[in-house]
Amino acid sequence: MKIQWLGHSCFTITLSDGRIILTDPHENLGYPSLNTCADIITLSHQHSDHNAIKAVAGSPEVVNDAGIYELGMVKIIGIPSYHDERKGAQRGPNLIFLIEAEGLRVCHLGDLGHELDGVLVEKIGPVDVLMVPIGGFYTIDSEQAAKVVGRIGPSFVLPMHYKTDYINFPISGPDQFLSGYSGYLKKTELEVSKDSLPAAPQAVLLSIK
């Protein structure tokens, strides 16, 4: 599979058969227009910077609730969590999505607003690619994100939901988080297969192609 970042919490996961899974589409946020189609869209929550389905071409299946979804050879598991540390009292619910395809497990944490307890860690299980918010204020910050990564133990770590020149959100950039990963990679695309997973967690900062 090939993974690209389209800004904020939006990624495309392109499978070997050409199908595209897209996470948390945005619109009018400051990032370039998505200009992509999708076969499956996952929505972690219903805030406007994460649920712009109309910005995506095609007639995708939309997964926006907890549960287990079998979509052809793709399995998606939605796990309830919260957008804040007060069980959703401030910003509402959040969905963590596990995407199983081509022998890999990709986890998108959405706008996770709290650290993970043992129950959630067990529900998530082993992860090959972890997409984790790091910017703070609306989500966990870089220090909390590092703890989450440590508990999950993924092979690849893709930071998301951080400050860039495209947006004017009161959140932090990626530097502090990435300082914990000497030798992190910068790429426009991450190609992943079961045979190419690193032995130790590898952080990858994806840039918009």
Image: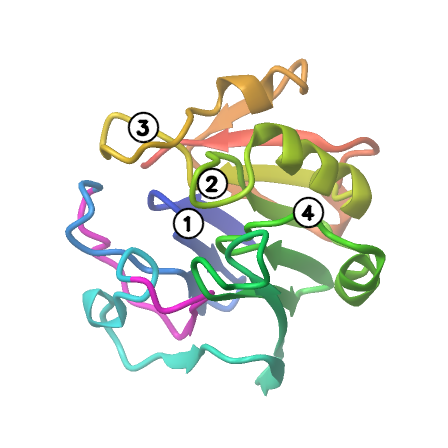
Of helix, strand and loop, which one carries label 4?
Answer: loop
Position in image of residue 142 (x %, y %)? 58, 29
Task: Estimate the spatial distance between the alpha carbons at disc 3 and disc 2, rounded to whole Å.
Answer: 10 Å
Q: Amino acid at mark 1?
A: Ser
The residue labelled by disc 2 is 160
Q: Nearer the viewer, residue 188 or 98?
A: 98
In the displayed structure, would residue 171 be above or below residue 86?
above
Q: Are marks 3 and 2 in contact (CB under 8 Å)?
A: no
In the displayed structure, would residue 162 be above or below residue 87?
above
Taking the spot 77% from the left edge, 34% from the top edge, the residue there is: 198
Q: Residues within 10 Å of mark 4 (few under 14, many from 20)?
A: some
Nearest-to-viewer mark from 1 and 4: 4
**Could you tell which of marks 2 and 4 lies nearer the N-terminus?**
4
Q: Amino acid at mark 3?
A: Thr
Task: Estimate the spatial distance between the alpha carbons at disc 3 and disc 1, rounded to whole Å.
Answer: 12 Å
**Could you tell which of marks 2 and 1 lies nearer the N-terminus?**
1
Taking the spot 61% from the left edge, 64% from the top edge, the residue there is: 81
Task: Estimate the spatial distance between the alpha carbons at disc 2 and disc 1, rounded to whole Å.
Answer: 5 Å
**Could you tell which of marks 3 and 1 lies nearer the N-terminus?**
1
- Direction from residue 198 to residue 62 in the image, left or right: left
The residue labelled by disc 3 is 164
- Is residue 76 within the magenta segment? no
The residue labelled by disc 1 is 9
Q: Are marks 2 and 4 in contact (CB under 8 Å)?
A: no
Taking the spot 61% from the left edge, 21% from the top edge, the residue there is: 184
- Is residue 46 within the magenta segment? yes
> Magenta span covers which residues?
32-47
**Could you tell which of marks 1 and 4 lies nearer the N-terminus?**
1
The residue labelled by disc 4 is 115
Q: Amino acid at mark 4?
A: Glu
Task: Estimate the spatial distance between the alpha carbons at disc 3 and disc 4, rounded to whole Å.
Answer: 24 Å
Q: Are marks 2 and 1 in contact (CB under 8 Å)?
A: yes
